């Protein structure tokens, strides 16, 4: 795994999510922990998209997924899961 600007940016987005979670009233440590738990799976998809693209199977035959599609899905998860979680916790 090489360090690239998108992986650094993804890590910064996770750090911003965790930092922003501490701005909500209530237990700040629990909010930061929940933000990290929500963000880390998406960070994993963004950072390891090359490896995850090679794990597709169709009828027992391995087929690679497009790396760009896997990265796009990871970025969507990284940006929208925390927003969805805040929406659900505020209006839920």
Image (tube, rainbow, N blue to C red):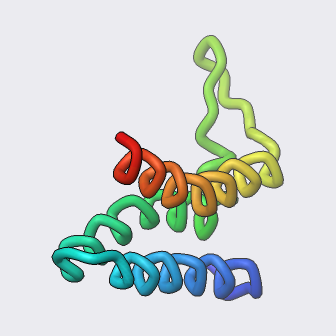
Is 43 rendered above or below residue 92? below
User: Residue 49 location, x and y as percent?
Assistant: 65, 58
User: Which is more toward the observer, 52 or 79?
Assistant: 79
User: Which is more toward the observer, 68 or 30?
Assistant: 30
User: Residue 66 location, x and y as percent?
Assistant: 81, 44
Q: On the picture, is 39 further left or further right than 45?
A: left
Residue most extreme to the top:
59
Q: Quadrant of the N terminus?
A: bottom right
Residue at 60%, 69% in the rendered image: 47
Residue at 76%, 86% in the rendered image: 5
Q: How many marks?
A: 0
Q: Quadrant of the C terminus?
A: top left
Is 87 rendered above or below residue 55? below
Q: Specify whether residue 55 is in view.
A: yes
User: Residue 71 location, x and y as percent?
Assistant: 73, 57
Q: Specify whether residue 2 is in view.
A: no
Q: On the picture, is 13 further left or further right than 28?
A: right
Is 69 rendered above or below residue 29? above
Residue at 59%, 40% in the rendered image: 55
Residue at 45%, 65% in the rendered image: 39
């Amino acid at each position: 795994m090489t360090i690239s600007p998108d992986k650094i940016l993804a890590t910064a987005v996770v750090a911003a999510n965790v930092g922003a979670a501490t701005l909500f009233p209530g237990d700040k440590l629990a909010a930061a922990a929940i933000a990290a738990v929500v963000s880390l799976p998406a960070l994993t998809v963004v950072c390891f998209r090359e490896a995850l693209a090679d794990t597709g199977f169709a009828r027992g035959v391995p087929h690679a997924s497009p790396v760009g599609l896997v990265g796009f899905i990871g970025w969507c998860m990284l940006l929208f899961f925390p927003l969805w979680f805040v929406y659900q916790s505020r209006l839920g």
